[in-house]
Amino acid sequence: MNSNSFKQLKPFLSILVIIFTLFSIVFLQMEERRMGYSVLKLTREHKKVWEEKRVKEIALAKVTRPQLLDSVAQQKFTLKKVQANQIIHLGGPVSTNMDPVVKNVAKKDL
């Protein structure tokens, strides 16, 4: 190729570079917009799942509250509330005539 033919191709090549650059810019803007929409969709989905989780936690807290469990135990399983004379105390008073080693063990257990 001689320099004369290269000079004739210069305008054509510069127009190709400009067109390629403009197409690249348009493509990148379209990709940016598409990614923005996917991020928006994921953000909405995340909020929806988080709200469902919160609603389920509230429902669980309502179901497992002590008053409801007491009423279910009394109605379905015919359980009755504990009275003071039904409580069994397993630890008793420490005797004074015990061996000193046994006293130390008994004090630690209390």
Image (cartoon, grey):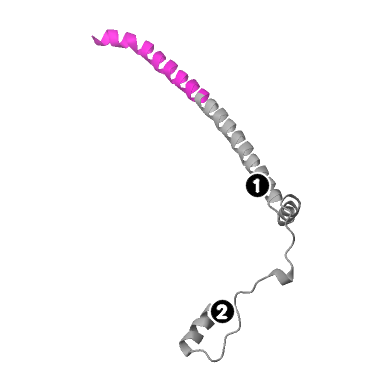
> Magenta: predominant secondary structure element?
helix
In the rendered view, does 8 fall on the left or right side of 29? left
Give the residue at mark 2. 110
101 or 17: which is nearer to us? Answer: 101
Residue 3 lies left or right of residue 100; in this view the side is left
Q: Position of residue 81 (x, y in %)?
A: 74, 62
Which x, y percent locates residue 53?
Answer: 63, 42
Quadrant for the C terminus in the image: bottom right
Would you place residue 31 above or below residue 92 in this image? above
Disc 2 residue type?
Leu
Bounds of the magenta span? 1-30
Which kind of residue does numbered mark 1 sit on?
A: Glu
Callout 2 secondary element? loop
Question: Mark 1 = which residue?
Answer: 57
- Residue 66, image x, y percentages: 71, 56
Does residue 51 lie above or below 100 as drawn?
above
The residue located at (33%, 8%) in the rendering is: 8
Label 1 SS: helix
- Tell me the crowding category of disc 2: few under 14, some 14 to 19, or many 20 or more residues within 10 angstroms, Cα based: few
Around disc 1, counting alpha carbons within 10 Å, would you say few (fewer than 14), some (14 to 19), or many (20 or more)?
few
